[in-house]
Each structure stands twice: as structure tokens, then as C-alpha cells.
Image (cartoon, rainbow, N blue to C red):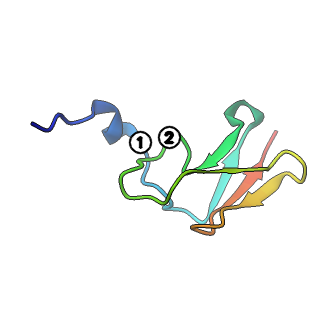
């Protein structure tokens, strides 16, 4: 029996945008992020963003920019 996940309807689609802004409160950074649905995404990968302030996902090409 399948039980729907009520939190899943509140999540954004995975890899839907090409650029995302993240804050230090959201670190460590992974793609897909915890706010994204995982069922239709690539494997989770952690991205080193602290040193340069930006990172690109090797799977989907999404660019992440550290703000604040």
C-alpha cells in the first residue's frame, strides 16, 4: 500500500532551474538540495561552495551561488 508523503507536495522539483542561490545556513550544500523532490533526480552529491562562493553540479549542471 502506497502512502503519499505530505511533505513531498511542498518540495520544489529537482533540477528545475539552472541557477540557485544558497546561504551559509543551508550548508553543507548538496544537489539535489533537501528542499527538492528526490524521486526524479540524480544521486545526491555534495558540492564544495565555501572556498570560491560558487559550485556547479557535475550531474545536472545546476550552478549554485553563495549569498550573504
Quadrant of the image containing the N terminus = top left
- Of residue 40 and residue 63, the one placed in the foreground of this image is 40
N-terminal of the pair, mark 1 or mark 2, is 1
- Report the residue at 79% width, 44% height from top: 67
Q: Quadrant of residue 57?
A: bottom right
- In the picture, the disc for residue 35 is 2
Q: Quadrant of residue 6?
A: top left
- In the picture, the disc for residue 52 is none
Asked if the residue under mark 2 is in contact with the one under mark 1, i.e. CB atoms within 8 Å, the reply is: yes
Residue 42 picture location, percent across and down? 48, 60
Kind of element beneath mark 2: loop
Residue 10 picture location, percent across and down? 37, 38
Residue 7 picture location, percent across and down? 34, 32
The answer to whether residue 23 is left or right of residue 4 is: right
The answer to whether residue 40 is left or right of residue 32 is: left
Which residue corresponds to mark 1? 11
Quadrant of the image containing the C terminus = top right
- Report the residue at 34% width, 39% height from top: 8
The answer to whether residue 49 is left or right of residue 34 is: right
> Disc 1 and disc 2: Cα gap in Å?
5 Å
The answer to whether residue 4 is left or right of residue 1 is: right
Kind of element beneath mark 1: loop
- Of residue 46 and residue 37, the one placed in the foreground of this image is 46
Determine crowd level at label 1: few under 14, some 14-19, many 20+ residues with C-alpha closer than 10 A.
some
- Report the residue at 20% width, 36% height from top: 4
Q: Residue furthest right?
A: 51
Relative height, residue 17 to residue 65 (above, below): below
- Report the residue at 42% width, 54% height from top: 13
Amino acid at each position: 500500500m502506497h502512502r503519499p508523503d505530505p511533505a513531498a507536495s511542498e518540495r520544489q522539483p529537482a533540477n528545475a532551474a539552472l541557477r540557485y542561490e544558497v546561504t551559509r545556513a543551508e550548508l553543507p550544500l548538496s544537489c539535489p538540495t533537501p528542499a527538492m523532490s528526490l524521486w526524479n533526480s540524480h544521486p545526491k552529491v555534495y558540492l564544495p561552495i565555501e572556498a570560491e562562493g560558487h559550485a556547479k553540479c557535475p550531474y545536472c549542471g545546476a550552478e549554485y551561488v553563495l549569498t550573504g
